[in-house]
């Protein structure tokens, strides 16, 4: 899977990373949209160390649910946020950190 990783001199590059493994109370979301907002570029410029995956906001489709998750299913469309680490093809997050996206 691809991810945007911070590099030296406050730059970023796309690199291969492993697909995340979920815990019992998490879901795995295949991202289809991400947001670029001030917190993201400010973290690259001022906060993060090389090797960090930045990114907060996402939308996508649930591809796997943990065994303790009962209120969301594989195939559900969701939007949510994480505290960094979102700029990648798939993201893991707690169920309570996202909302379902209604069908059109």
Image (spheres, rainbow, N blue to C red):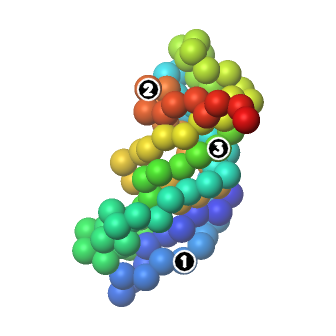
Q: Which element carries disc 1, helix, strand or loop? A: strand
* Residue displayed at 49% across by 22% down: 25
Residue behind mark 2: 96
Q: Residue pushed farthest left?
A: 46
Image coords of residue 98 (percent x, y): 49, 33
The part of the image, by quadrant, that contains residue 43 is bottom left
- Upstream in the sequence, badge 1 or badge 3? 1
At which x and y percent is residue 68?
54, 14
Residue pushed farthest front? 104
Q: Are marks 2 and 1 in contact (CB under 8 Å)?
A: no
Nearest to the eye among marks 2 and 1: give it.
2
Relative to the observer, which residue lies in front, 24 or 101?
101
Residue holding disc 3: 60
Q: Residue at x 62, y 40 (%)?
A: 29
Mark 2: give few (<14), some (14-19) or many (20+) Cα within 10 Å.
few
- State if disc 3 and disc 1 touch (CB < 8 Å): no
Q: Residue 67's image quarter?
A: top right
> Dot 1: few (<14), some (14–19), or many (≥20) neighbours within 10 Å?
few
Residue 60 left/right relative to 69:
right
Q: What label does residue 13 carry, if any?
A: 1
Mark 3 and mark 2 in contact? Answer it, CB < 8 Å: no
Tell me what residue is drawn at x 54 percent, y 77 percent.
13
């Amino acid at each position: 899977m691809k991810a945007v990783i911070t590099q030296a001199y406050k730059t970023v590059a796309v690199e291969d990373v492993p697909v995340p493994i979920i815990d019992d109370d998490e879901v795995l979301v295949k991202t289809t949209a991400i947001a670029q907002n001030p917190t993201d570029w400010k973290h690259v410029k001022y906060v993060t160390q090389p090797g960090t995956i930045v990114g907060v906001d996402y939308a996508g489709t649930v591809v796997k649910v943990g065994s303790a998750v009962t209120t969301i299913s594989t195939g559900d469309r969701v939007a949510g946020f994480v505290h960094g680490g979102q700029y990648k093809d798939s993201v893991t997050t707690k169920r309570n950190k996202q909302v379902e996206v209604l069908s059109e």
